[in-house]
Amino acid sequence: MADVIQLLSEHIANQIAAGEVVQRPASAVKELMENAIDAGATEIQLIIKDAGKELIQVTDNGKGMSPTDARMSFERHATSKIKSIEDLFHIRTMGFRGEALASIAAVAQVEMKTRQATSETGTRIVIEGTDVKLQEPCAINPGTTIMVKNLFYNVPARRNFLKSATTELRNILDEFTRIALAHPAISFRFWNNGVEQYRLDGDSLKARIVGLLGNNHEKNLVPVEQNTDLLNIHGFIGKPQASTRTRGMQFFFINGRYIRNAYLNHAVIQSYEGLIEKDAYPFYVLFLEVDPAKVDVNVHPTKQEVKFEDDRLMYSYLMAAVKHSLARYNIAPSLDFTLNPEIQQLPAVRMPFTERQREDTQKGYLFNTFSEKGQAHAIERNDSLKHWKELYEIANTPAATQIVDNVAAQQPDSAPTQLQGTVLTGAATEGKGKGSMMLVHGSMLVATVKSGMMLVHIRRAQERICYERLLRGFNNESAPSQRILFPSSYELAPQDALLLQEAIPDLVRMGFDIAPFGKNTFVVQGTPPGLLAGEEKNVLDEVVEQLKHESADATAKRAETLLAAMARRLSMNIQAMAQPEAQQALIDELFACTMPEYAPDGKKTFVMLRKEELEQMLG
């Protein structure tokens, strides 16, 4: 048989590598900006057109390249960062594998101009799909400029799979934000379609956070500083009131490189336990400096995932550092209930308590003072539970009176679509013998019906009611809006502002009066009826979070997703269910819905327990 295995051509090999390194325009932005940083640049300019599909240009004032190096930089596995195998274990640079420029040139039209400070002229190279079209001297300031035009022009399928311009621009903003945060001493400028988005001068980390992520962070930053033998931690965390319901304002950097690590993220979230709500996320920008030999940064093509030699110890150090900062700035109590090691060594702690010592203690003055009756501070000895029956007595309140069986309901065999009759509250009739509903644990309602008993989940029932009310207003384009006495402003990160801008028409149809108000800021003047004052920020946070994670084909279902998020926030007022009238209204409104059985997320709103099932439970 003929031989069938052969080496891939350089062109095909480069395109395969491009699939790993250059997945979208943001990938090319990341690689080019990291190359500029490795070149020692103090000023970096990024120019984008058509979300990077038409043009990505990065200009820096770094050390530049000689004509030979300029040509070699487009070869695969050509790098100036690794000379021996030992260098792999002490990597401090951003890039080191030597595939970025070769991969980009394989799927785009690339033009590079570069010049070293010691050279009188620079070098210009034009490459299309790995083919060098031109190399000539040129005039340029010291540094390097790389222009990537028509990305994926020779791979139409890859170009067709790119997302919308807004989505691709959001990804570019994400990469720009991470790199600019990691290097606050470098000046950055960013243009998008001829409009300057950012002008960031080299400054402190705090100034860079405020300049990139918004002025609203300035008063909520808490510094973190912890140096240990294993790692050094520094950066900023947000005060509990700065937490949001959107992810994306969490940044980890290992040796100046942005990473994703759910394990370390859990350490920070655990540090905020009891300070923020369960569905909220704290803000943090934390830098971890660790010996490069103890971390492997080459486990992922984009180098955003790393492996640590001892991640459990890093978890402990990180949690301790964050907790210490929260306590130091009087945000969290710094109570420690563990005994000091010196106290643990005292004889009173270590020696056993003998029977003779017990008898001597009981004869003492202090014991008698606290145990004899008639003393002001006597403590009654109680080795067993007294009055145990009180634990099982039902409180004699109107909301918990006995539920009688004088209400009508659906037949046992019929689907639970609507109540045939009404459920009357005993509290409303004040003991006239009518039926009742009972509030259980503050989150559920119990009501008897003709066939047995019904258990209603209050919050899910409220979600279904709010969802259908909002849906009717949305479909009729006549959703009411309640005016806010004092309009509130809402500032977001640039990439989140793009999402909210797209969703404004849908939000207006839901009852929001919201409009752009300057750079990355929106003003809210009206909200849907029933939304508590100050809750509009939480609703918009949830809307942005939903939009972040919607799939590419979910645009048609976007309204349903937003309505469900809105209904979830409007259903947070469970406290109002303490009133019998509110309980009755909830039941009536629930069974007036088109789908009363399920909440918008598909979970059950109520269950029916027939009399036979209840008797079977009791044996």
Image: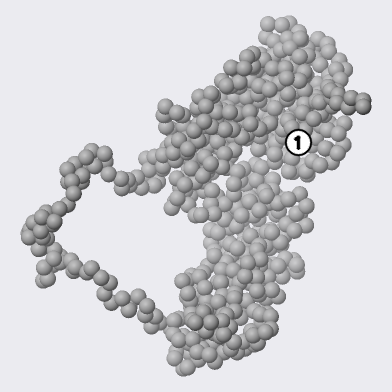
Q: Which residue is mark 1?
A: 24
Residue 457 pos. (x, y %): 56, 72
- Up/down of 379 relative to 15, above or below: below
Pick the quarter of the image with the N terminus. Answer: top right
Residue 465 pos. (x, y %): 63, 72
Mark 1 crowd level (few <14, some 14–19, many ≥20, 10 Å Cα): many
Q: Residue at x 57, y 39 (%)?
A: 261
- Residue 581 appears in the figure: no
Q: Nearer the viewer, residue 381 or 258?
A: 381
Side (left or right) of 189 relative to 228 = right
Q: Provide the secondary structure element on which disc 1 rests.
A: loop
Q: Residue furthest right?
A: 1
Residue 444 pos. (x, y %): 52, 73
Q: Residue furthest front?
A: 1
Residue 407 pos. (x, y %): 57, 89
Q: Amino acid at mark 1?
A: Arg
Q: Residue at x 42, y 29 (%)?
A: 227
Q: Quadrant of residue 169?
A: top right
Figure label count = 1
- Up/down of 588 relative to 140, above or below: below
- Up/down of 423 relative to 268, above or below: below
Side (left or right) of 576 relative to 553 = left
